Structure formats: C-alpha cells, structure tokens
Amino acid sequence: MSEAIDELFLFGEEKMEKAISQLRREFGQIRSGRANPMILDKVLVEYYGAPTQLRQLAQVTVQEGTTLVISPFDKNILKEIEKAIIKAEIGITPNSDGTCVRLNFPPLTEDRRREIVKDVKKIGEEAKVAIRNIRREMTDDLKKAEKSENLPEDTVKDEQDKIQKLTDKYTGMVDSSVTEKEKEVMTV
C-alpha cells in the first residue's frame, strides 16, 4: 500500500475523531435536568478588561445533582460572573449569596425533554453528515491517488471498502452517543 493511501486514512480518521469530539462537546452543553459544569464552557466573564472563561476564574462544583456552585477565586468578580451567566443565555438565573453563585436546575417538563431529544437527534445527524463528507473527501483523494500512482482496480476497491468500514464505525459511534444522550435526557 502506498504512503499516500496511509496518509489518506490517517487524516480521514483524525477528522472523524474531531467530529465525534465536537458532538460530545455539544452534548455536554445540552441541559438534561441535571447540573453539568460543561454548560458553563461558553460563559465569558469580563476580568480586568479581557473576556475570560468562567471556569478559569472559579471553582465549579455540583451539589445534590441539581445545583452548580460557582466559587470565584477573587470574590470581587461575583457581579461580573452573574452578568456573564445572564448574557450567555443558558436558561438559568444565577443566585448570589455574597461568596458564591448558585445555579439551580429545575426539573424539565415532559414536553421540554422531547424538544431536547429532537435537538440531540439533529446534532447527531449533523455529525453524521460531517463524517459522510469526510468519507467523500477520502474517496476523492483515493481516486486522485489511483490516477497518479496507477493503482490496480482491486486495490482501489479494497481501499473503498476500508473507507466505508471506517465511516460505518464512526456513524455507529454517533448513533450510540445520540442514544445515550436521549436516555439521559428522558430519565427523570
């Protein structure tokens, strides 16, 4: 097998891994009725004139499964943290007691859970589309390699089968992640 084909698979699999990582990041930011610190990943706090990630400025802990407790290292930025959480529109109002900020996650209604499951499926489908696009790129690159290196037809067919198996592996990972997240969201 040629070096070009080895690289093709290396880059293709790397891109598919990134698609799975992105999917998991997006799933981490979806509210499921339980407190999850990942929901704060997109919250930026104005700190000495620079937007800084909240999780770099405070310790975030989960309390009783339904409350996030944000304890800033610098107590003077409590108001800034509250403003940043409101501005990030995560759907939860922050409560401050002067030393920390609490985010209470109310239980989700059945209708809201179903809406979230639809979003989860949509995000999963987008990840599958990304993986199929990577497959198409890999197939195109394989055809270019076939022409430039005069690869035999049976070798090209074998490589296309390997590309499809790789695609199936990663779409299967997307499906299992979607199923797992659906179960998490629908569990009361």
Image (tube, helix red, strand yellow):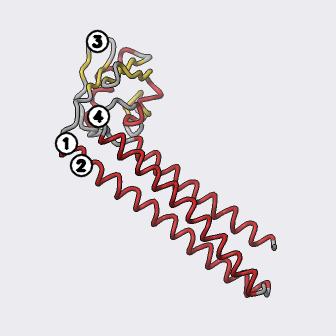
Looking at marks 1 and 3 on the same chain, the residue that comes earlier in the sequence is marked by 3
Mark 3 lies on a secondary structure that is loop
Q: Which residue type does callout 4 highlight?
A: Gly
Instruction: State the image coordinates of residue 179 (x, y, percent, origin top left).
Output: 40, 50
Q: Position of residue 102 (x, y in %)?
A: 29, 21
Which residue is disc 3 drawn over?
A: 98
Mark found first going from the N terminus, 3 or 2: 3
| Label 4: element kind | loop
How far apart are the alpha carbons under marks 3 and 4?
26 Å
Q: Label 1 vs label 4: CA separation?
A: 11 Å
Identify the residue at horizontal 36%, vertical 40% (top origin).
Answer: 184
In percent of width and height, residue 12 lies at 63, 64
Whether the residues at callouts 2 and 1 have beta carbons within 8 Å, the answer is: yes
Numbered label attached to residue 114: 2
Amino acid type at mark 2: Arg
Tell me the CA gap for discs 2 and 4: 12 Å
Q: Earlier in the sequence, mark 2 or mark 4?
A: 4
Q: Is residue 122 above or below residue 116?
A: below
Whichever of labels 3 and 4 marks the residue nearer the N terminus, that label is 4
Q: What residue is drawn where x is 32% and y is 20%?
A: 78
Mark 2 neighbour density, 10 Å: few (under 14) some (14–19) many (20 or more): some
Tag 1: residue type?
A: Glu
